[in-house]
Image (spheres, grey):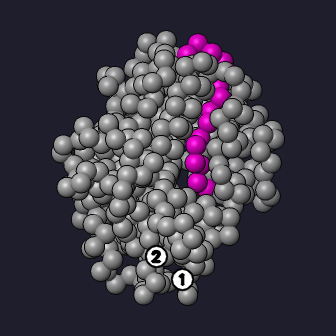
Amino acid sequence: MFVIRQKSRAIVRQIDRLILYRNQSNISNESTHSSSATWASSDTNGLIKQLSTRIKAGGPITIADFMRESLLNPQYGYYTRHEVFGRKGDFITAPEISQIFGELLAVWIMYEHSNSGSKDLQLVELGPGRGTLMNDIVRVLRKRKYVDAHTSIALYEASALMRRRQAETLLHRSFDPVISNDYRIPDGNYSLMWIDDLKQLQARKTYFVTNELFDAYPIHKFQKTPQGWREVMIDWNPTTKQLQYVLSSKQTIMSRLYQNFLNGIDDRQHVEISPERSVMMQGICKHLSTHGGSALIGDYGHWGEKEDTLRGFRKHEVVDALSDPGNIDITADVDFEELALSGSQIANVHFYGPVSQRNFLYNLGIDIRASTLARDKSPEEQKEILSAVEKLVSPEYMGERFLYLCVQNANNKNEPAGFSSPH
């Protein structure tokens, strides 16, 4: 019998010591700046040169502005120019680790939908990466012949480059998909379209899945000082020709907007807030409130207790977020309490969780699926399956740091699979 063993971490270390998941947190800026990582300057990095011009003209910019430019700048943005996923990229996500992950999420979707009493299934993935997760989900739905003719799939994706990669994975064609066009997945009757606004979705019950989307949304960072809360900004150092952190000398628009919230915090010296995460969360909740359905949100995160989580990634290694903008991934852990508070402002929805990925996947039967997958496999293949599962559930990898939050239309009286009680 193939068994998942928590104590088999030595196997994981031997098989792959090179992968560093996006789960490091509370990393000080000082420690990363003093690392051996190469720092770019305005002489070597076009985006730093562009940002330095902006800063010299208008003063320091917010971390949110910096993240937005670093990731999505049309000329220099990380997501617009780089292959970011997998071993050739800068980080690896759960769907890239094992097909079991996508298979279990397909089980979650079928469980939620089967309790809805509706034949129609509108499935939406927000931030679909290379399409790996959706491809695994579709494979399970097709195998089960699940609501074949009534299934429509929508991919919410901002990057034209990633839309092309998703088309290659799901449609086996290399082209630039047109937003809101209806495509058909081969060997099935599934409708597939790309969207860039939730308003483009059909007005019917919907099941949202998002895996490592919210941690890429821009954040504002605040630091407690003797003079009160001050926003952390990004300035340009003319001596080093590099970017640097500074504190705002007075209140900013965002520190005034969140003043009451910040003044109520006694146990933290740093706070990260993302209005864009809140806007997306409310958009999801509005759709669920009006049309029904559920949303599953998975990400590295916490429930309002972490402080400084902003960091960069290059080739699976943590680097300072300011070291080479446009050429590195930049991320910050998701405050699930912030998401729940934002979503709770929408009527007719309720929340479950967050629960750890370890508990969530075990509740969905990852051990049973792994045993089935490993049956009649060679010892080396079994070891590979075990290694992948350990990366998903082990506390030293993703098991405890990756969390899931579920949102349901309040008319749904069934607890979502993988969760226990509403928060």
Range of residues picked out in magenta: 116-130
Residue in the picture at 29% in, 51% down: 229
Look at the picture and state if 333 lies above or below 73.
above
Residue in the picture at 54% in, 83% down: 42
Name the amino acid type tagged 1.
Answer: Ser
Name the amino acid type tagged 2.
Answer: Trp
- Proximity of marks 2 and 1: CB atoms separated by less than 8 Å: yes
Q: Nearer the viewer, residue 397 or 179?
A: 179
Q: Residues within 10 Å of mark 2 (few under 14, many from 20)?
A: many
Residue under numbered circle 1: 42
In the rendered image, the quadrant that contains the C terminus is: top left
Q: Nearer the viewer, residue 213 or 182?
A: 213
Q: Residues within 10 Å of mark 1 (few under 14, many from 20)?
A: many
Residue under numbered circle 2: 236
Residue in the picture at 25% in, 50% down: 228
Q: Horizontally, is 41 left or right of 2 in the view?
A: right
Q: Quadrant of residue 320?
A: bottom left
Q: Is residue 120 magenta?
A: yes
